[in-house]
């Protein structure tokens, strides 16, 4: 699989490798055609700093990656870039979400995860087109913490599952991505 480096953390790479992924890291500015030419079975969109709006090159690449039909998984800035690529909009939070112990509801399972957060922008759920569902919700302010494309192996979360502030609350996301990759090959 190919990981886009928008500011990737080493622990994300460790988590991906721990579930059996072979990871090739490419720069954030890598065009989709170049990433697709690597023959990857899926794509990971990393975390990174700041406002996602100026990352137009990333949004354009992710739009093409999503059209490829291969699995796509994003975290933090990668989540925001995916939201923009799918036609959504982002907005700045009044204070941002920073630190550990932020409760997030996984709306697909009803479980609450204790998460680590470090972002100042969110994907506006009202701006998402039909076929993109809100999967995770911040229980402090009810903001969007995750999305998925219905019927496709494309999903993302706003928080940092690699940080493990709860024992292992969100590591299932890496296994989910691995499972999507295995089905794609």
Image (cartoon, rainbow, N blue to C red):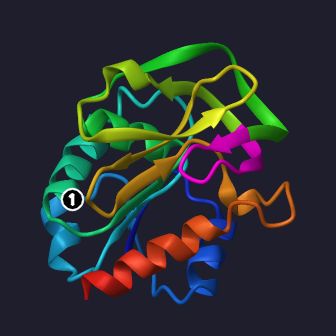
- Residue 184, compared with residue 79, is above or below; it is below
Percent coordinates x, y for residue 180 in the rendering: 37, 75
Stretch of the chain drawn in magenta: 104-117
Q: Main secondary structure of the magenta part?
A: strand
| Residue 113 within the segment the image draws in magenta | yes
Identify residue for label 1: 65
- Residue 143, compared with residue 133, is above or below; it is above
Q: Is residue 31 visible?
A: no
Q: Residue furthest top?
A: 94
Percent coordinates x, y for residue 114 in the rendering: 80, 48
Q: Give residue 55's quadrant in the image.
A: top left
- Residue 91, compared with residue 105, is above or below; it is above
Quadrant of the image containing the N terminus: bottom left
**What kind of element bears circle 1?**
helix
Percent coordinates x, y for residue 129 in the rendering: 24, 30
| Residue 9 within the segment the image draws in magenta | no
Percent coordinates x, y for residue 3 in the rendering: 42, 67
Neighbours of disc 1 within 10 Å: few (<14), some (14-19), many (20+)? many
Question: Image check: 37 left or right of 131?
Answer: left
Quadrant of the image containing the C terminus: bottom left
Question: Image check: 50 left or right of 71?
Answer: right
Identify the residue shown where x is 42% and y is 25%: 125
Q: Is residue 154 visible?
A: yes
- In terms of depth relative to the viewer, which is nearer, 131 or 128? 131
């Amino acid at each position: 699989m190919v990981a886009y480096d928008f500011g990737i953390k080493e622990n994300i790479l460790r988590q991906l490798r721990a579930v059996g992924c072979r990871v090739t890291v490419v720069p954030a500015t890598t065009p989709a055609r170049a990433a697709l030419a690597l023959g990857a079975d899926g794509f990971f969109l990393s975390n990174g700093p700041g406002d996602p709006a100026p990352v137009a090159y990333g949004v354009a690449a992710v739009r093409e990656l999503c059209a490829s039909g291969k699995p796509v998984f994003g975290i933090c800035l990668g989540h925001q870039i995916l939201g923009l690529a799918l036609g959504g909009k982002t907005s700045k939070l009044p204070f941002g979400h920073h630190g550990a112990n932020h409760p997030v509801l996984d709306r697909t399972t009803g479980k609450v995860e204790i998460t680590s957060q470090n972002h100042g922008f969110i994907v506006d759920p009202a701006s998402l087109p039909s076929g993109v569902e809100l999967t995770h919700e911040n229980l402090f302010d009810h903001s969007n913490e995750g999305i998925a494309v219905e019927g496709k192996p494309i999903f993302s979360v706003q928080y940092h599952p690699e940080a493990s502030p709860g024992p292992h609350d969100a590591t299932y996301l890496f296994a989910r991505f691995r499972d999507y990759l295995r089905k794609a090959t």
